[in-house]
Image (spheres, rainbow, N blue to C red):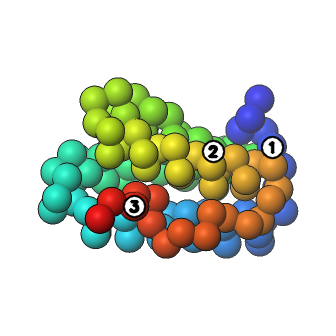
Amino acid sequence: MQDRIKIPGDATEKNYNLILLKLDRTFQKFKEKFPELVDLEFKINTILLDSSQINPFYYRLQNICHLLHIEAQHSYVIRHIHHNLCKDVENLANKLHDLEETELYLDIA
């Protein structure tokens, strides 16, 4: 099972925090322009860390990706965020500590 992947704690927690920071920056920059992000941000904030999991950080990110996958069916903006966020989560799962170099998960002028 993917939620059973064991990644060294320090790197996982650091990248987890960087991923959430990038997601938060994305919401702060674009939620006025795309109101669907306000609701999505609220839903994401209801997904909590589950300390019963071997890697609660990765498990929460997987749950966030799943939520975005569902919400992306109705919004191109969310679909774009989902795609970029999940690349970072996949890199985390594959023990690649290099996250995508962009500061945001959405790049719309």
Q: Residues within 10 Å of mark 2 (few under 14, many from 20)?
A: many
State the SS at label 2: helix
Residue 47 in the image: above or below residue 72: below
The amino acid beneath tag 1 is Ile
Between 91 and 109, the one nearer to me in the picture:
109
Residue 69: percent from the left, percent from the top? 45, 33
State the SS at label 3: loop
Residue 62: percent from the left, percent from the top? 59, 42
Identify the residue position indicated by label 2 in the image: 59
Mark 1 to mark 2 CA distance (whole Å): 9 Å
The amino acid beneath tag 3 is Asp
Residue 11: percent from the left, percent from the top? 76, 69
Quarter holding the C terminus is: bottom left
Between 75 and 50, the one nearer to me in the picture:
75
Label ID, residue 5: 1
Quarter holding the N terminus is: top right
Mark 1 to mark 3 CA distance (whole Å): 30 Å
Identify the residue position indicated by label 3 in the image: 107
Mark 2 to mark 3 CA distance (whole Å): 26 Å
- Of badges 1 and 3, nearer the viewer stands 3
- Disc 1 vs disc 3: Cβ atoms closer than 8 Å? no
| Quarter occupied by residue 59 | top right
Residue 79 in the image: above or below residue 99: above
Q: What is the total number of numbered labels drawn onto the structure image?
A: 3
Residue 89: percent from the left, percent from the top? 64, 50
The residue lying at 78 percent from left, 39 percent from top is 4
Between 56 and 71, the one nearer to me in the picture:
71
The answer to which of marks 2 and 3 sits earlier in the sequence is 2
